[in-house]
Every structure is written in structure tokens, then in C-alpha cells.
Image (tube, rainbow, N blue to C red):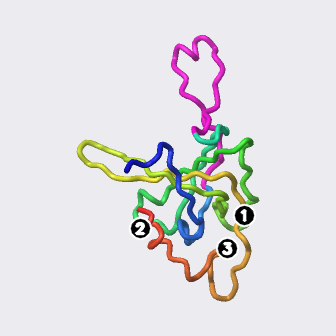
Amino acid sequence: MGAPRYARFSVDFEEWFPQGLYLVGAIQAVTEYQSQEDKARNRPVRPRLDEVTGHRLFRGTFADPSAEKDREKSVTVEFACAHQPVPPETVPGLPFRPVVLEGMTVQPRAEASGQAKWLTWVVRAIGITAPRATAGASGAVPGRSAATSGTAAKSAAA
């Protein structure tokens, strides 16, 4: 049985990122490829649209402190929404902005380099908010449950 084209799976943010997620840079609009000929003719740059929803795409780079491998510590997230997502305010004393993704989905994608092949995940969301401030004396990460196991969630989803 084949999977439907553009199959996306809804996932729980707290299970996928148990230690939270941090915005590293800015969220920017994604545009269609523009060839040198298009640039020479002063053709306008077109925004790239999501294949499923038809909304504009925006992209941001995030840091995942719960990642086990160095190559997985940086996560690119695509936002499919009508307007550019506005990140939450900065937190004094932190170099990055802690965030929570709303309406998060993942889509498997096969990658290859030479004969090596592996499965990666395209992470998408429809919005972004600040984490809930519920950390108490237990030392829990804001907005996270202490019983959540992200490693189990990631391996089960793979």
C-alpha cells in the first residue's frame, strides 16, 4: 500500500521536542527559484506556496537541545500560513527565543548521498507562540511535562 502524496502526520510538540525549541534567527518568506534570465528581465520574485493548503511558506531555523546527534541540533521549520509568523518577545538573559509550534506536522522525506540513504523529516507548523511559564521548583522546562519522553516519540515516529 502506497502512502498518499503529500502525506503529513500531526504530532505533539511536547513529545517531538521534550526540552523545547529555540528560534535562532529570523523567520523569512520562502520564494520560488528565479533564474538569471528571470532576474535580467526584472521579473518579480514569487512567493512559494504550500502544495496542500495553498498558503504562503515561511521558514525559520531553530535549535533543538534534546537532539542526540550534532546534525540534528539545527531544525528548519516551514510555516504555511496567510501572514508571516511573529516570534514571541525575547527573554532577558537568553541568547535565543524559546518557542512552541502550533499545528505541528511532520512529513517523511528520503535523502541520499552516494549509496547512503536515510529518512529525514520535514517539520511544518501553522503558527508560533511563547512557551507557558509553568516551571516550578521541579526544574521542568516551561510548558513541558516531566513525564514526556521525546526520544521514544522520535524513534516511534521513525
Q: Could you give the CA–CA distance between mark 1 and mark 2, rounded to whole angstroms?
A: 26 Å
**Dot 1, crowdedness within 10 Å: few (<14), some or many (≥20)?**
some
In the rendered image, which residue does mark 3 sit on?
143
**Which residue is painted at 64% across and 61% down in the image?**
95
Circle nearer the N terminus (3, 1):
1
Residue type, label 1:
Ala
Residue 42 x, y percent position in the rendering:
64, 14
Residue 155: image tag:
2
Q: Is residue 44 magenta?
A: yes
Residue 94 x, y percent position in the rendering:
66, 66
**Dot 3, crowdedness within 10 Å: few (<14), some or many (≥20)?**
some
**Which residue is painted at 62% across and 81% down in the image?**
140
Residue 133 x, y percent position in the rendering:
73, 74
- Say if mark 3 contacts mark 1, CB within 8 Å: no
- Say if mark 1 contacts mark 2, CB within 8 Å: no
Residue type, label 3:
Gly
Name the residue at the bottom extreme. 137
Q: Is residue 108 left or right of residue 130?
A: left
Circle nearer the N terminus (1, 2):
1
Q: Magenta segment, which residues? A: 24-51
Q: Is residue 140 left or right of residue 149?
A: right
Residue type, label 2:
Ser
